[in-house]
Amino acid sequence: MIVIELPDGSKLEFDRETNVKEIAGRISKSLEKNAVGALFNGELIDVHTPIKESGRIRIITQKDPESLQILRHSAAHILAKAVKRIYGYDNVKLGIGPATEEGFYYDFDLPVSISEEDLPKIEEEMRKIVQSKEPFRREVVSRERARELFKDDPYKLELLESIPEDEEVTIYWLGEDFFDLCKGPHVEHSGLVKAFKLLSVAGAYWRGDSRNKMLQRIYGTAFWKKKDLDEYLHRLEEAKKRDHRILGKQLDLFGIYEEAGPGLVFWHPNGSVVRQEIERWVEEEHRKRGYQRIYTPHIMKADLWKTSGHYNFYRENMFFVPVVEHDEEERLGNDEVPLTCEEIERANWYAVKPMNCPGHILIYKSQVRSYRDLPIRYFEFGTVYRYEKSGSLHGLLRVRGFTQDDGHIFCRPDQLKEEIQGVLDYVMELLSIFQLDYVINIGTKPEKYIGSDEAWEHATNALIEALKERGFDYNIVEGDGAFYGPKIDIAVLDAIGRKWDGPTIQVDFNLPERFDLTYVDRDGQKKRPVMVHRAIMGSIERFIGLLIEHYAGLFPTWLAPTQVVIIPVSDKFLDYADEVYRKLKEAGIRVKLDDESAKVGYKIRKAETMKIPYMLIVGQKEQDSGTVSVRSKREGELGSMEIAQFLDKITREIREKK
């Protein structure tokens, strides 16, 4: 007997194996008609998948967000079949073709190079497959049969060998002439995949390993309704206009130079102003909230990272440097005198820090601490370095060197909840200042972790209770914690609804144990403090990248590299323009005087391109009346103002962080 439990707790019984359609039909004819799959015991399945055991089920229809995964995986197979039809079934070798959060992709080994100019042709072939409503059909096959089917496809054979022996092997047919090694899920037939679009072409190493062959990856997306697809494509167009890499160059904010190395950011004067203003506000807020600023080295002995656990759990993302004693001095190898094999063997290895926490721990541990001293809150603008594959680097959003507004709180267990809530209050202040929406996630114990299960449960509960008492909604993301403790991650939403990694709060009972951190309690006994890792912005580089795209380069006045540009209508008014310039400069405004001998229209367009919040136009009328003609990038023409009146307006904006 198979017993199926429904979301409301009611149960259905079957005397043989069943499927989603049959179960849905027992509930209602409408649900049977609209079902596209189900979550069965937490796994997403489609209507083709036989159900052979008892369990919990939730039927999925097109209204459920999970249904998009089924639709998009099906679109990936339609794409693969279309490519095979165009370039020859025997010529095309298939990699993988999963659904993603934003759409789908498929990797191909092809005899020709595909460009984005080829995508309309492939889309047209996909539409033919959609119009013919070819059925998806699931088939369980033996390993011998699978090897025969994929004997000419090395990538599928490699995937086949990675399937555990105790798992069944399934293929999905699309029509009568296309099949793929696949667990599903898929829609019932290709005719359901109507609203789709191919987006781009890129290279991708097989299985993400640069030692393997580079395949050609085609990206696309799909929705149930054309309206949803059109809205998504509109957001993509908006995203292109907001691309921080393009705006960063246009506004002269930052650069990344191959001569220095990939993923290393150089802040130009304009970008440095934005960063300095943010850092100034962040530092002042830390001071108000009882943090002590500290500085720690960029490079520390590898043994320290072994104690912390980073060496075992994170070393593939770390940079190491061998240092050897030579003539009573430590020596680094160089091109002229490289380290010998013997020297490397006996070297003291140092790591360029990927995190700031061990440095903060050493400062805490430098003296005896009393329960009266706690909580101790340390804060650092700590620059860290992490190895990221060159293919994953992306402007300011994914780099190898970045700075965190990193803080660590050492507190007693009875202080933990209050400290977490204090950090949450700070985070909400930050999000309010920059007018950012957010989603809160709690990451729980991952597959690889350090510490006891009891400590993990205590830490996770502290995070949940802190959020509940502040009235915040949150999602639990199983297995998404750091290796040393659970965490609150706050995903920031930008102006067009995209999610960005942002503030994080991590509770850690483990590093205090590994470093033997203590404080002397009221009873005179040594006790173990709790450690809270927290970053309010996270990576400053990524946060500024977020802001560039969020504001589309038009920073609020308090952040703008140049807040005002003064434009004289001709050289006759340069003296008056200079007088206005000096008054604004003395008031602390970041102002420029455009004294170039060019037409006013050209100067205005230049200021528009640089997204300067205010232009002050001065000519005969303004000179005679001692005023300025004000043009706002956000509000348009504001008319004539006295200089003092304009100063009052802009200084208030700056003071109120607008």
Image (tube, rainbow, N blue to C red):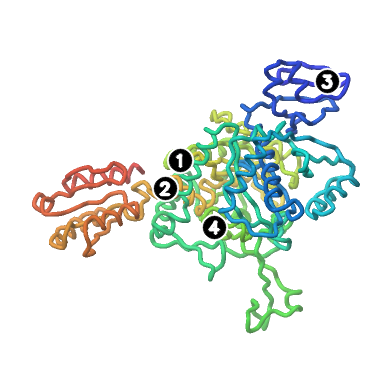
Q: Which residue is mark 3?
A: 3
Number of disc labels: 4
Is residue 618 rendered to the left or right of residue 86? left
Q: Earlier in the sequence, mark 3 or mark 4?
A: 3
Helix, strand or loop status at disc 4: strand
* Image position, residue 511 (x, y; %): 68, 50
- Name the residue nearer the viewer: 206 or 112: 112
* Image position, residue 506 (x, y; %): 62, 44
Q: Earlier in the sequence, mark 2 or mark 1?
A: 1
Q: Which residue is mark 1?
A: 495
Q: Which residue is mark 2?
A: 552
- Mark 1: give few (<14), some (14-19) or many (20+) Cα within 10 Å: some
Query: What amino acid is at disc 4?
Result: Phe
Q: Which residue is mark 4?
A: 402
Q: Earlier in the sequence, mark 2 or mark 3?
A: 3
Discs 3, 4 touching: Cβ within 8 Å: no
